[in-house]
């Protein structure tokens, strides 16, 4: 019995020891488990963080390397292309030109020999017409060649091939003979001021002239005038010896003036032109002579006919504003009206300076907006390229791995694979669709007024961007209106000009409504009241200026205020868009990386 009791007590003690040990182990597990879980999550977070930091560093390096790489490639290709354009294609052009010149000279000589008894019939009718068309085509080619040469002035490569070819061409016997014959046939032209050549047409005609300048060089060109006498007088005033002035029968398409008639002068060119012209006038140079000086300084062919036409109009007694107006759409309507007003008070040079500063401010604002949008646009394009590259080239390589290991795909991975497959299979459809949408949008925006107004309405109601558009339009409106008002332009004419210079259909409608209200005898500010496109601050400031008779000064204040608001909006867009695009890139890449990694854990567990 005693032994049994001893055995029982021993068993009880063992059980108690086991219970104590188990309780201790459970307690220790409960204490250690949270720390272990915390450690696992911290390490997992650090791993994910390291992965994202590594990916970000890789893409940052790729971005920097890509920008540098493509910039070097771009400049290299540009330099090579400029050299090719300047020297090889230029040489080909010259050889072709000299060949056709020789061919034409030989044909002309042959015609003169064969039809010696019929010089008037052949030479005056056929040869002159062909020569006229040929010179028109040659003029267009020369303009194109000069534009190429302007872009390649930075290269100073010694190539005497051009001089060699020219010398060889000049040494040809039939070329010398043709030139000697032409020189012998040249006779100084005289025009009777009271004859038929002095009768002016109702519309300008294009005349082809042949003259010799002060340096002794023969010049062939075209000039638009009302009569032959006008062309003759213009050339004589320029110190030229005139040999021929004939009506041009060539098609106007080949004429430089016709091709450039509707081409507006670039803003930067207009700024320089106004500043230079104002400087010459302040120096005491007469207006016509000042334009002549500018014409000699400006070597660009596309503006030569503009200078000639302005000089001709001034010589014929037209005012400067009318001379600018007759150039078509080359000069802005605002500038023409400002010059017209300045002519009445005799202060053209100050107005030219003022307009130069005005267009300089517009150009600076445009550059600021482009500068603010350029970097985010580059980031967005790079993000789209990177994401597309990963979906099209990286993801498909993992598909084979998943299929070979029979990995279970979660919804995130499945979505990524579906997008990748869609891009691979339908890339042509996607590209064509994007191109069609862009082309359709551009066409409709330019040609359909209702669509343009709808899109502008939508853009103006977008956050931040809408405010930027409103600030830009209000600054342009206020500054332009103040300038017109200071120069005593009629109120209705000023509003009409404001409606023409803006490209926003909302503000065009406001200007049209304002003119109607003014014709009814109402206040101008009534048109701006309670209109969503005109801020209340602008309305009350214009109302105050209109009531106190200080409209110009209040408009200047409105322009300054919204100019600052516009700059702040540009800075705000630049500040917000850049981090948003970087976050978008990180999220997109992170989503793709996570969708790739998650099935890998499943494969690892299966292998384990």
Image (cartoon, rainbow, N blue to C red):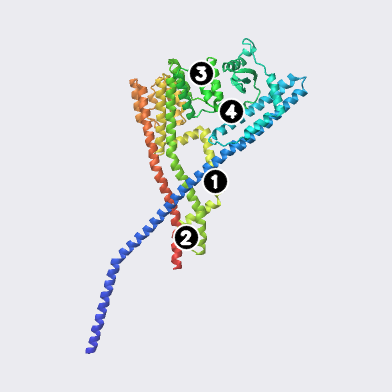
* Residue 247 rendering spot, x and y as whole percentages: 65, 20
Q: Residues within 10 Å of mark 4 (few under 14, many from 20)?
A: few
Q: Residues within 10 Å of mark 1 (few under 14, many from 20)?
A: few
The residue mark sitting in front, 1 or 2, is: 1
For residue 475, what is the image quadrant?
top left
Q: Nearer the viewer, residue 122 or 41?
A: 122
* Residue occupied by mark 1: 431
* Residue occupied by mark 3: 289
Residue drawn 62% across the image and 13% down it: 198
Q: Residues within 10 Å of mark 3 (few under 14, many from 20)?
A: few
* Residue occupied by mark 2: 409
**Disc on the earlier residue, 3 or 1:** 3
Q: Can you see residue 571?
A: yes
Name the outermost residue toward the left.
2
Q: Nearer the viewer, residue 257 or 146?
A: 146
- At numbered mark 4, what does the secondary structure look like: helix, strand or loop? helix
* Residue 47 to residue 485: above or below: below
**Disc on the earlier residue, 3 or 2:** 3
* Residue 209 to residue 473: above or below: above
Q: Can you see residue 515?
A: no
The residue mark sitting in front, 4 or 2, is: 4
């Amino acid at each position: 019995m005693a032994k049994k009791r001893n055995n029982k007590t021993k068993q009880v003690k063992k059980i108690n020891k086991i219970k104590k040990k188990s309780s201790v182990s459970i307690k220790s597990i409960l204490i250690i488990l949270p720390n272990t879980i915390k450690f696992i999550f911290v390490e997992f977070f650090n791993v994910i963080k390291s992965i994202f930091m590594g990916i970000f560093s890789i893409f940052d390096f790729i971005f920097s390397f890509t920008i540098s790489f493509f910039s070097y490639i771009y400049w290299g290709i540009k330099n090579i292309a400029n050299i090719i354009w300047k020297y090889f294609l230029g040489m080909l052009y010259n050889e072709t030109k000299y060949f056709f010149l020789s061919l034409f000279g030989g044909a002309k000589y042959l015609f003169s020999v064969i039809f010696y008894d019929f010089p008037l019939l052949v030479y005056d009718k056929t040869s002159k017409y062909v020569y006229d068309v040929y010179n028109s085509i040659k003029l267009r080619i020369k303009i194109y060649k000069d534009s190429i040469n302007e872009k390649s002035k930075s290269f100073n490569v010694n190539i005497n091939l051009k001089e060699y070819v020219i010398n060889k061409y000049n040494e040809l016997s039939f070329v010398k003979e043709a030139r000697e014959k032409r020189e012998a046939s040249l006779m100084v032209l005289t025009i009777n001021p009271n004859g038929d050549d002095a009768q002016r047409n109702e519309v300008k005609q294009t005349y082809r002239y042949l003259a010799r300048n002060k340096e002794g060089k023969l010049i062939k060109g075209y000039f638009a005038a009302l009569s032959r006498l006008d062309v003759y007088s213009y050339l004589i005033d320029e110190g030229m010896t005139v040999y021929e002035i004939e009506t041009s029968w060539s098609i106007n398409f080949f004429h430089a003036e016709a091709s450039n008639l509707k081409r507006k002068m670039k803003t930067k060119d207009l700024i320089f032109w106004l500043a230079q012209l104002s400087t010459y006038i302040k120096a005491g140079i007469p207006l016509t002579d000042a334009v002549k000086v500018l014409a000699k300084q400006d070597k660009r062919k596309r503006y030569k006919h503009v200078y000639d036409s302005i000089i001709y109009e001034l010589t014929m007694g037209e005012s400067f504003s009318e001379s600018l107006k007759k150039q078509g759409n080359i000069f802005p309507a605002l500038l023409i009206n400002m010059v017209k007003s300045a002519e009445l008070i005799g202060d053209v040079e100050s107005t030219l300076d003022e307009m130069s500063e005005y267009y300089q401010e517009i150009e600076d604002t445009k550059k600021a907006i482009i500068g603010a949008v350029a970097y985010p646009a580059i980031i967005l394009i790079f993000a789209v390229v990177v994401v597309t590259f990963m979906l099209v080239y990286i993801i498909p390589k993992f598909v084979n791995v998943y299929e070979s290991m029979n990995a279970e795909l979660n919804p995130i991975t499945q979505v990524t694979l579906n997008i990748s497959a869609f891009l691979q299979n339908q890339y042509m459809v996607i590209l064509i669709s994007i191109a069609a949408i862009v082309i359709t949008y551009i066409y409709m925006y330019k040609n359909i007024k209702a669509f343009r107004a709808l899109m502008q309405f939508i853009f103006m109601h977008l956050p931040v961007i809408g405010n930027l558009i409103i600030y830009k339009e209000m600054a342009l409106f206020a500054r332009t209106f103040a300038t017109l008002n200071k120069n005593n332009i009629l109120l209705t004419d000023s509003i009409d000009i404001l409606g023409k210079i803006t490209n926003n259909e909302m503000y065009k409608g406001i200007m049209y409504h304002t003119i109607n209200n003014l014709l009814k005898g109402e206040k101008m500010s009534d048109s701006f009241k309670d209109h969503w496109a005109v801020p209340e601050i602008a309305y009350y400031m214009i109302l105050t200026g209109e009531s106190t008779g200080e409209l110009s000064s209040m408009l200047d204040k409105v322009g300054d205020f919204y100019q600052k608001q516009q700059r702040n909006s540009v800075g705000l867009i630049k500040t917000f868009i850049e981090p948003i695009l970087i976050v978008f890139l990180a999220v997109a890449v992170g989503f793709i990386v996570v969708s790739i990694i998650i099935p890998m854990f499943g494969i690892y567990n299966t292998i384990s």
